[in-house]
Image (cartoon, rainbow, N blue to C red):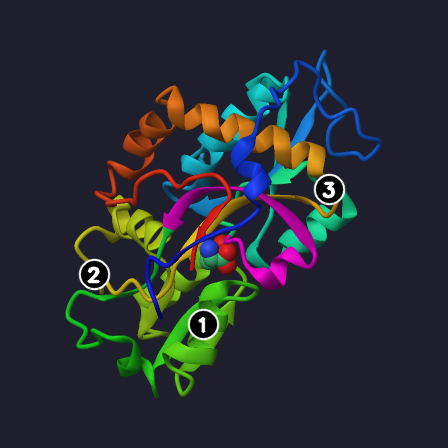
Amino acid sequence: MQLRKVTAVAATALVLSVTATACGGGGKDSSGSGSGGGKIKIGIKFDQPGLGLKQPNGTYAGFDVDVATYVAGKLGYKPGQIEWVETKSADRENALARGDVKFIAATYSITDERKQKVDFAGPYLLAHQDLLVKKDSTISKGTDLNGKKLCSVTGSTSAQNVQKTIAPKADLRKYSGYSECIAGLQSGAVDALTTDDSILAGFAAQDRYKGQFKLAGLKLSNENYGIGVKKGDSATVTKINSALTSMVSDGAWQKAVTKNFGPADYKNEPAPKIGVIVK
Ligand code: GLU
């Protein structure tokens, strides 16, 4: 895997001049009907601490939640107008195609395959695939996984990368969410869990898991997080890119990083440039 090879895509996205208007969606789908009392439906994860988490008191927290809330604000929606919808890894493309949500901010990597079905704004974060293992595990590199029970999630790039390149002979168990994987790692049903380091760090820092697991620190891939929108909705992509640009320049992006990744001691990459994908 060649890291840090920067490819400029969607050069037009770099010369943004459009300002998000005060008017919201206005589309005919059910995902958002504009500002002035309307609601906007936004897809996030519900079970990923530090990124997208439904808390016991019914509120939502995490970096993706903060990014989505900021973006919705620029689209003309107040936090109280947001309806959060759970979009699991395997459901994301379909949720957008059906118009269930206006956009998705759910640790959603921009890939060529997904771009056939959805459009992306961003990227807004660069993460890397890594492994989470028990503290006393001897697994320390990708090839150590061959013959081992490994958990990842259906519809994720992490599961695909394992099968294609990292450890094709691993006994890969695909679950529907990472919270199921972490339970499997704790019980010993699996030997390792693989996905983005951002997600793994969030789990490892949870009180109930503290001291039990370690990250391998491998940077097995580049995961460029984008905001997914319905294929062809270029007006929303342009507005979201504009919102993400101002989120970085006005300091809100860094604030969200510190608030959400600080507790997990996750050392994130600097803010990506809009339209620039690290291959
Ligand atoms: N970022 C990767 C992906 O989009 C893994 C995390 C996830 O499943 O959401 O597939």
Cα gap from disc 3 to disc 1, whole angstroms: 28 Å
Q: Residues within 10 Å of mark 1 (few under 14, many from 20)?
A: some
Cα gap from disc 2 to disc 3, whole angstroms: 37 Å
Residue 96 appears in the figure: yes
Is label 2 in a helix, a strand or a loop? strand
- Tell me the kind of residue under disc 2: Lys
The image quarter in which residue 125 lies? top left
Q: Position of residue 71 (x, y in %)?
A: 54, 27
Q: Is residue 192 magenta?
A: no
Mark 1 lies on residue: 161
Which one is earlier in the sequence, the residue at label 3 or at label 1?
Answer: 3
In this rendering, the count of numbered labels is 3
Mark 2 lies on residue: 214
Q: Are marks 3 and 1 in contact (CB under 8 Å)?
A: no
Q: Residue furthest right?
A: 28
Indicate whether 58 appears above or below 76: below
Under 8 Å from ligand 1: the CB of mark 3? no
Residue shown at the point (20%, 73%) measured from the top left: 140
Residue shown at the point (50%, 72%) measured from the top left: 160
Residue shown at the point (55%, 59%) measured from the top left: 111
From which residue to which does the magenta span run? Answer: 109-126
- Tell me the kind of residue under disc 1: Asn
Residue shown at the point (50%, 24%) measured from the top left: 70
Cα gap from disc 2 to disc 1, whole angstroms: 21 Å
Which one is earlier in the sequence, the residue at label 2 or at label 3?
Answer: 3
The image quarter in which residue 162 lies? bottom left
Q: Are marks 2 and 1 in contact (CB under 8 Å)?
A: no
Mark 3 lies on residue: 100
- Tell me the kind of residue under disc 3: Asp
Image-based side of 18 in relation to 143, left or right: right
